Amino acid sequence: MMKKILIGLVGIIFIAFIALYFTTRPKLEVDGSYSPSTLALTLATVEVSDFENVSYTKYQGERSKILVIFTEQKNMTMENGRMFSTGNHPVEALLPMLHLKNAGFDFEIVTPTGKPVVFEMWAFPGKDEYVKSIYNEYKSSFEQPKKLQEFVDTSFTNSIAAASYAAVFVPGGHGAMLGIPEDRNVGKALRWAHENDLFTITLCHGPGALLSTTLDGQEFLYEGYNMAVFPDAVDKQTPMIGYLPGDMPRGLSEKLKSLGANIMNTASDNTVCLDRRLITGASPLASNSLGKLAASTLLKELE
């Protein structure tokens, strides 16, 4: 009897091990990249977001535009050579946009070269009517965004155009670390925002864009600032459940720390932070709170 029980337990453990193995394997896509595993998607994505449909007193002033800098890149090569299928996280992009739109602001959608915006569609909350609505509203702009270079060339030299902007927004997603931190035009846009008292809004891996202010030997624009950002320690754990197909090629939170930023969170939680005119959030869980903070802050400061 005992032998049969032991054999049964071994069988159960084996089946459980096989199930765990397959549910934690990243999924191979047609282009050779990997999207998160079944288990990772279950733990880290939602069908309906936590968006709160807040009723704001709409902004009526001249500074009604927000420059949104999206990544146009999809695949991040990990330390083991595997490519992670990434881009802009839809919740991290669209929830803040929903709040800002409801507060009376509109968007100038750009990518570095004008190629289409790339979203992590595996993270899209498919049953969220609010998210689907704003995605469809701006779908043509996502597919045919403006070139950041053109924005830099025209808006920086046009005082009237510059006066119509309230903020620069860089959505999160691991894709925000592809090309954006090394783009001189991103650095120029952030310095332009800083010099003209515009707000800068970003979350999760989006703060990687802040590194662009150090290009060409310039001092880090945000030294001494408090900010929330996705922790490197969590990125190091996610390959275990198949969210990432390998270790990250580089970290973000520790790099920002080394430049003098004060990181206010240690977990990938809903922490948001306002320091001067920089508004940041820690992770996808902070998307709704970041949107509310950004909308209410802009309405208050631009009265």
Image (spheres, rainbow, N blue to C red):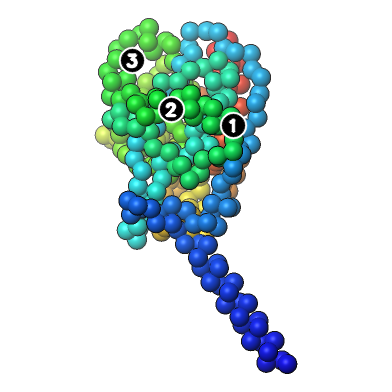
User: Residue flagged by tag 3: what amino acid is it?
Assistant: Ser
Give the amino acid type for the residue marked by disc 1 in the picture: Glu
Query: Are circles 2 and 3 on residues that touch, CB within 8 Å?
Result: no
Residue pointed to by mark 3: 155
Residue 232: image tag: none
Q: Quadrant of residue 173?
A: top left
Residue ID at (44%, 31%): 170
User: Residue 40: percent from the left, percent from the top?
Assistant: 53, 55
| Label 2 element class | helix
Q: Nearer the viewer, mark 2 or mark 3?
A: 2
Compared across the picture, whether 175 is left or right of 63 comes to left
Q: Is residue 216 above or below residue 155?
A: below
- The earlier-in-sequence mark between 2 and 3 is 2
Query: What residue would you read off at disc 1?
Result: 129
- Decide: few, some or many residues near mark 2? Use Cα within 10 Å; few <14, some 14-19, many ≥20: some
Which is in the foreground here, disc 1 or disc 3? 1
Report how far apart the C-alphas of labels 2 and 3 lie in the structure.
24 Å
At 35% from the left edge and 8% from the top edge, which residue is drawn? 159
Q: Secondary structure at mark 3?
A: helix
Residue sitting at x 46%, y 42%: 121
**Residue 302, placed above or below residue 42:** above
